[in-house]
Amino acid sequence: MKLYNFFNSSTSYRVRIALALKGLHYEYVPVNLRAGEQRDSGYRALSPAGIVPTLVDGDIRLTQSLAIIDYLDQVHPLPRMVPEAIDLRIRAVEIAQTIACEIHPINNLRVLNYLTTELGIGADAKTGWYAHWVKEGLAAVETMLASASSGVYCVGDSPTVADCCLIPQVANALRMGCDIDKFSRIRKIYEHCTALPAFIAAAPQSQPDFIG
Ligand SMILES: N[C@@H](CCC(=O)N[C@@H](CS)C(=O)NCC(=O)O)C(=O)O
């Protein structure tokens, strides 16, 4: 398996967590987002949208982090990222999609770049935009965690796709200087998960293309 990804990409980080939890080995192929390599024609042949991550597994070529995690669950079922039990499954997918559909897309690199280059928005306003949507989205997740009976994971007693999405999103938010102090359930999960070997192996600073 090859994973085309970037150390600092939260969507790549989601997939790296799932791969690490499943104990799967893969070839790390860096795509430097800062240098715009995601827009190169060669890479676009793999990812028509010009985004990371892309997984290549034999004849399978797949983009979209949640689709990749679903694929990994199909071909390497244990441990499952999307739980089988219906009560856990619905909550895990709900939380994952809240992050993947409501927070990440409007704070993505190309959206932030468009705000500054095309709409003439200044750096402070751009940071404010990012912080606003993170706060709104994480507040919703914090509420969902109450009904998911979360503990040290978003749902149940092992990591799921929800944690694969939450940890990178929180890491990103902290890197951007967002205050997450009031989200106590999220903080508890973040502190627990980021100390686990699989999450440490998947973290940006553990990657071969890491730039400090
Ligand atoms: N929904 C996609 C989003 C992928 C995505 O937007 N990745 C970002 C990095 S986190 C990217 O490649 N951005 C490139 C850009 O904005 O130019 C997924 O979950 O894989």
Image: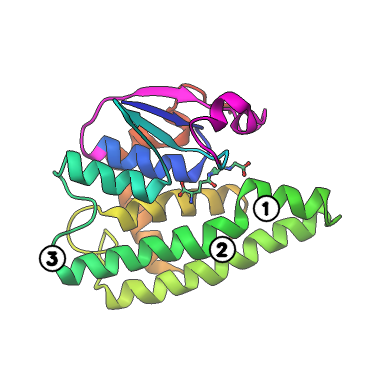
Q: Earlier in the sequence, mark 3 or mark 1?
A: 3
Residue 176 is tagged as: none
SS under mark 2: helix
Q: Residues within 10 Å of mark 2 (few under 14, many from 20)?
A: many
Q: Is residue 197 visible?
A: no
Q: Earlier in the sequence, mark 2 or mark 3?
A: 3
Check whether the beta carbons of the residues at disc 3 and disc 1 lie within 8 A of each other.
Answer: no
SS under mark 1: helix
Q: Which residue is mark 1?
A: 111
- Looking at numbered disc 2 in the image, what kind of residue is underneath it? Val
Q: Is residue 85 magenta?
A: no
Q: Residues within 10 Å of mark 3 (few under 14, many from 20)?
A: few
- Distance in Å between CA atoms under marks 2 and 1: 14 Å
In the foreground, 66 or 212: 66
Q: Ligand 1 quadrant?
A: top right
Q: Quadrant where the C terminus lies?
A: top right
In the rendered view, does 46 fall on the left or right side of 91?
right
Relative height, residue 44 to residue 63 (above, below): above
In the foreground, 168 or 58: 58
In the foreground, 122 or 71: 71
SS under mark 3: loop
- Looking at numbered disc 1 in the image, what kind of residue is underneath it? Val
- Where residue 171 sits in the image (x, y, percent)? 49, 48
In the rendered view, does 2 fall on the left or right side of 153?
right
Q: Which residues are magenta?
A: 21-48
Q: Which residue is mark 3?
A: 85
- Looking at numbered disc 3 in the image, what kind of residue is underneath it? Ala
- Where residue 135 sits in the image (x, y, percent)? 56, 68
Check whether the beta carbons of the residues at disc 2 and disc 1 lie within 8 A of each other.
Answer: no
Q: Earlier in the sequence, mark 2 or mark 1?
A: 1
In the rendered view, does 154 fall on the left or right side of 41?
left
Q: Which residue is mark 2?
A: 134
